Image (spheres, rainbow, N blue to C red):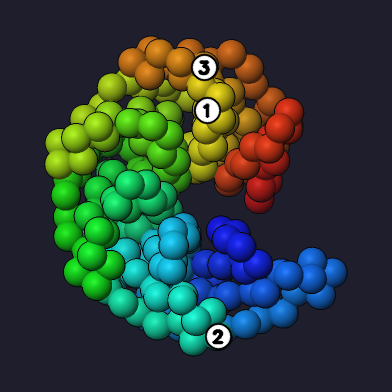
Amino acid sequence: MAVSGSYAYVADGDGGLRVIDVSDPEEPVEAGRWQALGHAYGVAVSGAHAYVADGHVGLRVIDVSDPANPFEAGRWETLGYAYSVAVSGGYAYVADGSGGLQVVDVSDPANPLQAGQCDTPGYAYGVEVSGPYAYLADGDGGLRVIDVSDPANPFEAGHCDTSGYACGVAVANATAYLADGDGGLRVFDVSDPANPSEVGQWNGAAWAWDAAVSGAYAYLADG
């Protein structure tokens, strides 16, 4: 899910993209819907567009300027299986399963184009972008830190293996919070991206799928 303004955008699997009006948080209502042909796993919103990681189809760019009538503006087929997406500076960064990290130029949303790609040793599930780095939850590949300062030539700057199965990641204040499957929540100092170091762990999770951070708390989606 992604939130922008008064709307929440939900990647709803076979249900596609759901646009929910949350202007009254006590009574959220569906404002619009776009039906995917694949399986909507992840979504990011920037400006008037929602970027949907749509499984085997790849990246979908959905015009949500009219939330009641979202429509597909463009698409780009990825090499693997699109699970998650982050958007920054005119680029979409797709965690693409066996396809690693895919960097897509979305400066023209109607004509997304591949800018670059970086293979990873695991299975890319989650991605977060902070500054010139993309942080990947890479399945049994743990945490991978990818330098995307040149989007056409992304490369791995650092990594840290984990005991679980990395599914989701959030980054705040030079700290990465990794949802590591049966490994629980792993916390990494990434102030030196070339040498991420684990600084904490909470292993009470059944299966940590994703993480979000706000203030002094991390929120874990726990299977």
From the image, tell me which residue sits under label 2. 68
Contact flag, marks 1 and 2 (Cβ < 8 Å): no
Tell me: residue 178, above or below residue 37: above
Please tell me which of labels 3 and 2 falls first in the chain. Answer: 2
Q: What secondary structure is marked by label 2?
A: loop
Q: In the figure, is residue 83 to the left or right of 26?
A: left
Residue situated furthest bottom in the rendering: 69
In the rendered structure, the answer to whether residue 153 lies left or right of residue 81 reads: left
* Residue plotted at (32% across, 58% down): 81
In 3D space, how far apart are the residues under numbered discs 1 and 2 (Cα atoms)?
36 Å
- Residue most extreme to the right: 26
- Callout 2: few (<14), some (14-19), or many (20+) C-alpha neighbours within 10 Å? some
- Marker disc for residue 194: none
Local packing at callout 3 (Cα closer than 10 Å; few below 14, some 14-19, many 20+) is some
Amino acid beneath label 2: Ala
Q: 93 or 187: which is nearer to us? A: 93
Answer left or right for 78 relative to 124. Answer: left
The amino acid type of the residue labelled 3 equals Asp
Residue 163 makes an appearance in the image: no
Q: x and y percent of residue 185 in the render?
A: 62, 31
Residue at 17% in and 60% down = 113
Residue at x 81%, y 75% (from the top left corner): 27
- Where residue 28 appears, as percent x and y from the top left, is 75, 74
Where, quadrant-wise, is the N terminus in this rendering? bottom right
| Residue under pointer 1 | 176
Give the label on residue 189, or none.
Answer: 3
Q: Is residue 18 above or below residue 151?
A: below
Q: Earlier in the sequence, mark 1 or mark 2?
A: 2
Can you tell which of label 3 and label 2 is closer to the viewer? 2
